[in-house]
Amino acid sequence: MKPNKPQHAGCWQSLAVLINILLLSCCFGPSESSTASLMRIEGSIEVNTFENSLFEWHGTLYLLENIACLYSQHASKWFPAYANSSYVRIRDFHTGTIVANISSTIGYGFITPFPDYQQEQLWLFGSNCNRCQAHQNHRGIQGCMEQRGIVAWKLIMDSKKNSNRDRSTAPLFRHWKRQEIPNTRATYNVQVTAVKSSPMDTTQQSTKHVMMAEPFVFYSNNNEDGNLFQGWSVIPNTTKPEGGIPIGGPCIRHVNGYYYVFTGGHHVELLRTNNFQQWELSHHRPFLQPSHRDALVAPYNGFPAAQESRQFPPMHQDWTKWDWNSNDADIAYYNDSSISDLNNNHKPTFLVWGAGTQGRQPKPPLTVETQCANVVAVTNVSIRALFEAQFKSASASAT
């Protein structure tokens, strides 16, 4: 979530089955013919954390959270090195157990994970933005240094404690190498996707990875060895979507020849392209908007046990006092087969996004400590099936 950034307004026309994708309750089961109708909002998983991302690593689904100083459980309460600084931490998504506070991210922000399943390597990407120091210490809005490149972190493998290849040992996510990527310019959010060649993809067939920097700047990387510290080049002649589409908080995934992008502001939209010049907007829009279901208590991340300590009950009682914007949507990273298959009996696929005031004061009795939450939705279909359903017409999807 990015307070003080201009946003675009929009409204949702619920006219068809697929348009209801994220407003439906759990009354639908795997027998539903419409894949999108299986998606449902489960509710909030945490209060006052910033951008969240989900990724699967060695069979476990993890939650990466960007933490700023208004968060009630900021690590500085226990570790002085984190004082007055933003950072990221990793939790077990299902239990909420904190797996790691990543000390090398202290003073950075807008960080997202990228699990390179082919290379069995975990990366992080972000910006030199200390979210706790906006307009302080030569930093501007969002606590960002004016001149900054995109920053990458590579998980360092320890043969005894933190081996990617020893799947019997849980990763600790403790040791990272950090480096600014040459010839890049960071803004705010940044994210990487793996690329598989496809006849539908008109970009360079040798591209292995694509990186998106907010708002709509794209880089490609062709390194065969998977080294993402270097080798990035700007993709030329790209365009931005037209028509007042929000361009904040992007998330990018390459699936079956298309680059799918979530953007956010007041609401979340889903777009796709296969050449970064022509953009197709989902027929069922917006993809997300504020909803009373955002104020439910989701059964993940240990939130049912923690929600009272996070002062969530007043937020649960009246969602209209704080839930004014939907932004920073991110769909979980899964291995290749989880993304590309089309069967409807798929293991759960999760989507996480921010719901809140975008830095404004919520209505009483809420305070700045209860101005936003991160929300999840779930579906039993694959990412490919979910995405492709959004680009079918309502009449076609109903047949």
Image: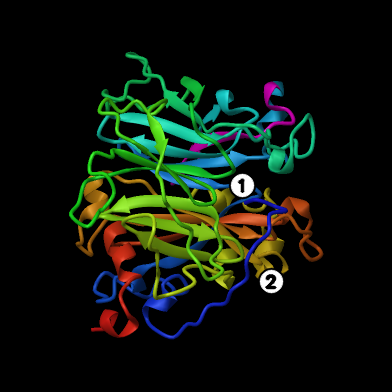
Q: Residue 316's quadrant in the figure?
A: bottom right
* Residue 382 visible in rendering: no
Q: Which residue is mark 1?
A: 50
Q: Nearer the viewer, mark 2 or mark 1?
A: 1
Image position of 135 (left or right of 242): right
x%, y% of residue 372? 66, 56
Over which residues does the magenta segment extend?
Answer: 81-98
x%, y% of residue 133? 75, 35
Q: Residue 260's quadrant in the figure?
A: bottom left
Residue situated in front as seen by the camera: 328 or 42 = 328
Badge 2 element: helix
Residue at 50% across, 82% down: 13
Give above or below for 102 relative to 52. above
Residue at 65% across, 29% down: 107
Residue at 79% across, 56% down: 367
> How dense is the environment of label 1, judged by Cα within 10 Å: few (below 14), some, or many (20 and up)?
many
| Residue type highlighted by circle 1 | Phe
Q: Residue 131's quadrant in the figure?
A: top right
Q: Which residue is mark 2?
A: 320
Locate the C terminus by quadrant.
bottom left
- Distance, label 2 to label 1, CA atoms, is 20 Å
x%, y% of residue 146? 68, 35
